[in-house]
Amino acid sequence: MACLVGALPRAVSAQSYSEDAVKAAYLYRFAAYVQWPQGNAANFTVAVAGADGVAEQLEKLLNGRQIQGRPARVVRVHRAQELQDAQILYVAPPSPARRTLLEAASGQPILAVTDEEGGLAAGAVINFLPVGRNVRFEVSLPAAERQRLKLNAGLLSVAARVERSPQALLCASLPQGALAACNNWPTLLLASGEQPRSLLYRRRRSTACA
Amino acid sequence: MRLSAGALALLAIPASALAVETPPESLEELGRMSLSELTHVEVTSVSKSPQTLSTAPAGIYVITQEEIHRSGLHSLPEILRLAPNLQVHQESSSGYEITARGLVGNPPDQAFSNKLLILIDGRSVYSPLFSGVFFDQLDVMSEDIERIEVIDGPGATLWGANAVNGVINIITRDAQSSTGTLLRAEGGDRTQSLAARYGASASDALSYRVYGTGFVRGSLEQSCAPQASSCTEGGSAQDHWSRAQAGFRTDWKSTLDSLTLQGDAYRGTEHQLGASEVALMGANVLGRWQHYSAYSLWQLQAYVDHSQTGHPVNGAAFVLTNYDVELQNNRLWGARTELVWGIGERLSDYHLETTPTLYFVPPHRWLDLTNVFVQGSYAVTPELKLTAGSKFEHDPYSGWSVMPDARLGWSPDSRNYVWLAASRAVRAPTPFDTDVRETVGGIVFLTGKPDFRTEKVTAFETGYRTEPSTWLNVSASVFYSLYDDLRSIEPASATVFLPIHWDNRIAGHTHGVVAWADVQVTPWWRLSPSVRTFRAALHFEPGASGLLPLSQAGDDPGSSWGLKSLLNLGPRVTLDGFLRHVENLPDPYAPEYTELDARLGWVVGKQAELSLHGTNLLHRRHLEFPAGYGAFIERGVALEARLSF
């Protein structure tokens, strides 16, 4: 029988929320874990493409709130030109322009968030993952570096998966003392082949963070 | 038991919830959560397009915990009356016949409701001995039920064996959601019950609960068949009974894995008019492991379920143990495709105690039921989703059966949903169909048929759900089911009458409508009307004798309706009622009836609630089975106190 599933006796927590509302809450929360390069925009802008439901929830949530000391607002975008001033870009699969938008965000100090398999490969810093009935997310450190964003460790510890550059992966396997030196090695010295994917999965219990 | 990770959540939407849209206050709540808390929030829909209506492409009604609580009911078959897509007949103090879409059986013809799958936390509880359900063996602490999903129509592909006319999926709260102490005492003229539960979290990841519950139910009044000689109409049916049950559940959850271990044990005594009492006992234990990874969910579940009844007079004595193991995997492929597949194996070891007048040959067997299923769903467009799959089931009597299923769901916008389905399911033969022998006066009168075939249904259904406004939602569905090889009874041959035997010589179709609505009349008053119609057009297949009329397949009422009212009389007082009407049973005849249940609840403080509950208030007594086959169901009143801390 169709997607009738609910046979899953894994009980729902006392309350469950719409997926759009949860994603909106994430988009709002992410900002606290990211450091953008100095900018002079008057507002903190979250650009949303292809997800009117999320945009609607986010508008309600951000109403009257500030992010990083600036009034927060939501704009619905369809074209690359509309990305100016955005600090966060959320693109969902229904948007036909998602590749163009992600390319336009590339190299800009924009936290690009996607919602599809392969989102990180397409250039996003954060990609939502449906894991059971929860919404979780994966993070790409190389993408964050490219966008000149600094990610707080709290974000990484909660992520279901963190993608690291081959260099960082290799360095992380070294003893503590060698870590700093390793991080400064010329990239040339590092093998740039396939990333050992099994290492990319970090299955740690998420710990409460502020 | 079955699940599909991606879409499962669709069902979590309570049918009676008027607006599933996240209310502003919970959005605020989400906004205050930390990232880590957000990762634990469960979402109501994992579908990609925003949905406010349940997008399950089937006729489904969800009985919520709130509805159970406000009904004042604690008995499982009584709680199932709340689902408008079920037909519930009480036969005696402890006996019920329940079906969806008719074919409830016919007691004079030894036909029983046998085309329903009931799952309690993934444990299948229909009896492999005759495909029916012994409701006296089942109890769930009503306060710990999370929800009951009731699906009318075939659900064999995903849900499991015997889901021919419907599936009842009872889901209890996990241990994390049932912590604290709860005490309940109920005293009434028909029933007295006690229940206690204690739950706690040993750590962030590990929680457990233990519970005990027990009740005593009084005798009903005897009804007499028209020509019965030695029967005292209105005398005590002497069917009072009592039952006690205890159980536990532990849940351990880490980020990507969860582990559940749960079990119950019960004992009961049922009295019978002019016969020795029946002793019931049983125990079960179930373990389930789920592993989530991105885009995929694995589940492995196993259980052992033992039950027995002793010293009966009617031949129902048996010792039965089911061993079941199932593996399932759900996987999302990109944004559009979801695949579910699984394999399962159930072994049933039974021993039937024979009596001289009713016995089974052989009295002991191992039954082995194997299944493999696969189903894919594909979002053709964000609004249109196609689901198709099949189950392949091997039963020990008739070999492999193929049960395909195809469904289409279309949600043009977030307020409307239309679905269409065509599916096939079978009821596999059981020892009652193949091995039974009945004697009358030392002569074998009835025998099973060793080559009894599966009873088959092909169902075509369509349904529509809409939420035109935040104060109104409506759900309606229509079905047309083609049956083949339904069980009939035939003489030994054209010239020799005895012994008569089961055969598969009834076919035909049934059709009907099920509809319900929730109307939030004011913020403090909700009305939920419902209606169900049923018509059967069955016929005998060539070679049938027509020894008994076609109503042997089911003595079903033509239609019924219900009206629920939930009224908040203030922050602490609720007054709720459930009025229902069931049309007469045609053959044998039983009169139509209209009855009313009502409950007045008063929340005394943060920890206590008092309630006064009445059942069948309109008349002193009524029948839900033909006279002589069912007892009179009487009015009942009870007072209940509940403490939780």
Image: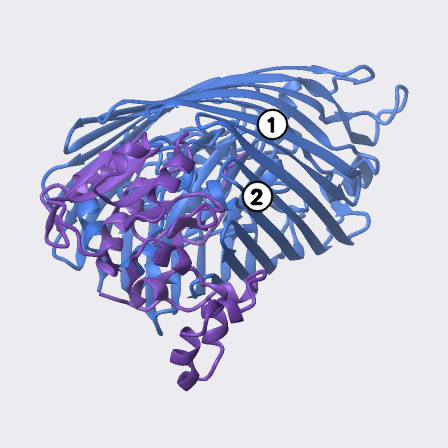
Dot 2: element: loop
Disc on res. A91: none
Look at the numbered disc 1 and give the secondary structure of its residue.
Answer: strand
Left or right of B418, for residue B484: right
Q: Which mark is residue B406?
A: 1
Camera-nearest residue between A188 and B384:
A188
Q: CA distance from mark 1 to mark 2?
A: 28 Å
Q: Quadrant of residue B248?
A: bottom left
User: For the point 34% across and 26% down, which residue is it?
Assistant: B414
Q: Nearer the viewer, residue A91 or A123?
A: A123
Quadrant in which the N terminus of chain A appears: top right
- Nearer to us of marks 1 and 2 is 1
User: Residue A159 or A124: which is nearer the viewer?
Assistant: A124
Asked where in the image residue B250 lies, by quadrant, the reply is bottom left
The kind of residue tagged 1 is Ala
Q: Colour of chain A?
A: purple
Crowding at dot 2, Cα within 10 Å, few <14 / some 14-19 / many 20+, comes out as many
Quadrant of the image occupied by residue B60? top left
Give the colour in which the image draws chain B: blue
Image-based side of B398 in relation to B619, left or right: right
Picture coordinates of residue B244 (x, y %)?
44, 61
Q: Residue B423, image x and y in percent?
A: 62, 27
Instruction: Count neighbours of disc 1 (C-alpha within 10 A) and say few if under 14, some if 14 to 19, many if 20 or more.
Output: many
Of marks 1 and 2, which one's residue comes earlier in the chain? 2
Label 2 sits on residue: B133
- Pinpoint the chain carrying mark 2: B
Q: Is residue A157 left or right of residue B395?
A: left
| Above or below: residue B300 compared with residue A168 | above
